[in-house]
Amino acid sequence: MSEAARLAAFAETARQIADEIVAPNAEAEDAQARWPAEAMAALGQAGLLGLHVPEAQGGHGEGLAALVAVAETLAAESASTAMCFAMHCVGTAVIAAKATDWQKQAYLEPIAQGRHVTTLALSEPGTGVHFYLPETTVEVEGDAYRLNGTKSFITNGGHADSYVLSTRAAEAAVGEGTFSCVLVDEGTPGMEWADPWAGLGMRGNSSRGVRLNGVRVPRNHLLGAEGDQLWYIFEVVAPYFLMAMAGTYSGLAQAALDVAREHLGTRRHSHTGELLGAEPVLAHRLGELYIETERTRRMVHAAAARADAGEPDALVAVLGCKAAAGDTAVRVANEAMTLCGGIAYRDNSRLARILRDARASHVMAPTTEVLKTWAGRALLNLPLL
């Protein structure tokens, strides 16, 4: 099967799930801030939770292009569901990057079988956008680690089966000022979850915080070697997360455009019978939104393909994609609200939900401003940090 056909098959599977399960639940999940359990189960049954598990462990062994294809398809119906799926995929990619034989059996195989959801737990309330500088501490106790600290904004929080968590490295191993990644299983004693997530947007993704009170983790849960966290951040987390979010916000922009197109193409003035979209200024503005949405979408897909191919200049494109897609989603959703008039401002309209979800792009680390700065530094061959 060609790459194009393979990506189309993944997108079609996601489309069926989006139509049959995601769309009917999206409004209620937003209103109730409810995690999309049905959709995540369906994605597991369809094999999509194993998108980034190597074929040797029963997965698809896919890269960024497939992640974008599925994320944007899900986001067209629910950005929260796309976010939950995407963060599972990023966590999976981190586990797979340097998995031991035991980790392959204990984590990757169940993920491929649709029986295990994972996610990232990197952000902390004290370091904010500097998510790569954890303050969570770790102490070595024989054949285990003891973790203390607080993590924030954990997508799938309280619902995932495991968490890819960043910590300060054990000083005895690699010295002060370095960081590591470990796997923490849900339900491990000492995990104290904060209140359920009830944000302005992305309300269904269960983006919760957790307090780690002396959480004991076996040392075979260490990912890679002591001090590998920054390698994971910039070699795995950054490309997978940024492209996942770019796909999600590209899908949101398309959804907003579709709502505006349907409204202008079906609503008529009662006194003339003319379509709203027949007004030249409205048709012009709709055309502008199409151009911006399609231009961004093509940028996102091209960046994913370049990164998968290992092209040397793919980094700048990857850095720019989340910023571009976020800007586009906010602008298109906002303009669509105006084009659709008062009907779009009713309580919890679909466009209102899209706009609230899109707005999260600018505050989600790495933020839009940070990414644009990093892209500029990459163009100048300067270190990102």
Image (tube, rainbow, N blue to C red):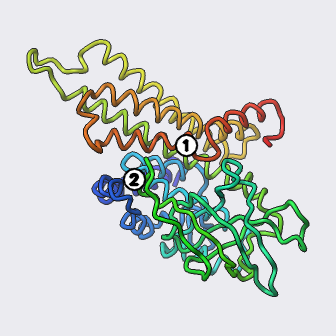
- Please, which residue is most extreme toward the top here? 280
The residue at which mark 2 appears reads as 12
- Please, which residue is most extreme toward the bottom here? 142
Quarter holding the C terminus is: top right
Q: Residues within 10 Å of mark 1 (few under 14, many from 20)?
A: many
Q: Measuring from the top left, give residue 151's x and y in whole percent.
A: 63, 63
Disc 1 vs disc 2: Cβ atoms closer than 8 Å?
A: no
Q: Mark 1 vs mark 2: give the one in front.
A: 1
Q: Measuring from the top left, give residue 198's x and y in whole percent.
A: 43, 56
183 vs 33, left or right, is right
Q: Secondary structure at mark 1?
A: helix
Label at residue 246: 1
Nearer to us in this view, 258 or 194: 194
Identified at 46% across, 55% down, the residue is 10
Q: Secondary structure at mark 2?
A: helix
Q: Is residue 7 above or below residue 112?
A: above
Nearer to us in this view, 275 or 385: 385
Quarter assignment of residue 170: bottom right
Q: Residues within 10 Å of mark 2 (few under 14, many from 20)?
A: some
Label at residue 308: none
Q: Amino acid at mark 1?
A: Ala
Q: Measuring from the top left, give residue 39's x and y in whole percent.
A: 38, 63
Identified at 54% across, 70% down, the residue is 193
115 vs 167, left or right, is left
Identified at 45% across, 49% down, the residue is 8
**Numbered-mark total:** 2
Q: Amino acid at mark 2?
A: Glu
Give the CA distance from mark 1 to mark 2.
Answer: 19 Å
Q: Measuring from the top left, give residue 60's x and y in whole percent.
A: 56, 64
117 vs 176, left or right, is left
